[in-house]
Amino acid sequence: MRSLTFSPMFSPKRTVPNLAALTLMGLLAATGVAEAQSVVIQDPPAKSTTVTETLNAAKEDFQAGQKSLQDRQYRTAIAHYNQALLKNPSYTEAYYSRAMAKAEMGDKLGAIGDWGEVLRLNPQQASALGQRGNLYYQLGDKPAASRDWTAALQIDPSLTSVQVNQAYATMERGNPEAALTELDQVLRLKPNDVAALVNRAYVKQQLGDRNGALSDLEQALRIQGNSPEAYLNRGLIYQQMGRDNDAIQDLTMAIKAKPDYAEAFYNRAIVYTTESKFDLAVADLTKVIEIQPTRSDAFYQRGLLYSMSRNRSAAIEDFEQVLKLRPEDAATFKAVADLRADNGDLSGALEDYNRALQSDANLADAYASRGKVRGKMGDYQASVDDYTRVIALDTRNISAFYHRGQARQQLGDGMGAIADYSETLRLNPNHAEALYGRGTLMAQMGQTMAAKNDLQQASKLYLQQGKAEGYRTTLNWLRKF
């Protein structure tokens, strides 16, 4: 995670490599099919010419589909495969390629159905089992994925794409050491397997071996200079290292290699945000949404950027899209509430903070923001209660102690306020406002020396921090002594 200039919630989406065989090139390699094979059917001589013409027409449709698939024109490819299958319902390669196109479009269930047809026609098609297992895994049906992968390797033990994906699953189960061992085994047999290198780099990164991860990614790029996954993951490592320019360069190369690579656009938007290039960040997030219209995190992050630029209507529109996709999303309710509060709609903000906390009772930021709104509405006891919840969730939250002190001061609880200001200063001795607040209370209680000491320190800090109004107000108090 890396905090950015406007919100700690805006954080990089840590992306592991796509399941190895799910990339377009990986799928093409896995099929081993460059074009449809001629199908010979023994029919009576009188019909053979008609059958041959039909099969040839199916082959032409299939080849047109293959070209569209390679050009990433997936809908067009599917239309061609549909025509091929109408002419030849037993066309295994057309089912396989149509499954590939559907998978690229995000139609996982449709792709699973087509790979099922492949396996009905050819139960020994190991790559189809591997591909179907990948999609089962992505849909959360891990037992079905494991069954397909195991069956695929029983048919073809050398199918490294499946071995890589099994290692991926091992990593996701929280066992990176075992995943590393599995990938080491793959690479001992096939040292130039790019997918295995990219996945091993990710595992090494998770284990803290950043140099080892970079070494694997650089080797992957020497073998396949246009590997989008290798560029993406190296870009993410550069980002973590603070090498933003290198990160942007790698993420741009990933996009060049794969123009619809949503994760590369998303993560480049994050780097642009750290660089305060907000217009470029918005453009990249917009591209993500064009590629994946149901990508709720992209809507959310773009909404935050619009909020920063005071484009309130655009921000709310994006947050509403998030709530259509994730109706109980606490962070989005809070973001909308923040916009309402900034716009002076305190009752509307309060309602949305309540909804956020109904969805997530442990969202400390929502309690803090609601406490602030309640204070503005004059409900200081409720404000104290909210800040108390924040402190229960985060015992080192300086802001919560300070603002609870303010609310207690408004309630006339001077001792409680002094205790909170003192805790604020224990956590941050240079908190000028807490010194000022405690100093004024001490003065009101007749503790002149303690008050004078706090106010003198506050005036120095206000001056150092360039807070002219605070400095003038503190001097007015000091003149009373």
Image (cartoon, helix red, strand yellow):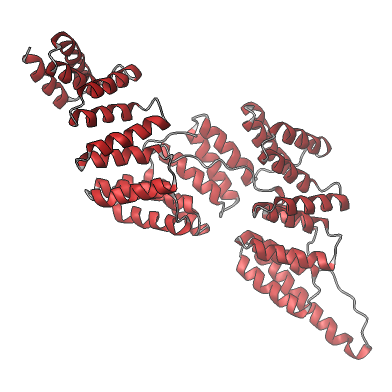
Residue for point 36% across, 57% down: 317
Is residue 398 at least partly visible in the picture? yes
Rendered view: 44 above or below 294? below
As drawn, which residue projects farthest toward the bottom? 46
Rendered view: 323 above or below 179? below
Instruction: Tell me the quarter of the image containing the C terminus.
Output: top left
Q: Residue 9, percent across and down?
A: 43, 40
Depth order, front residue of 352/31 = 352
Q: How many marks?
A: 0
Location of residue 39 (image quadrant): bottom right
As drawn, which residue projects farthest toward the top? 449
Residue for point 49% across, 30% down: 242
Q: Residue 470, percent across and down?
A: 16, 24
Q: Residue 392, percent across and down?
A: 40, 30
Depth order, front residue of 424/305 = 424
Rendered view: 360 above or below 101? above
Residue for point 64% across, 44% down: 17
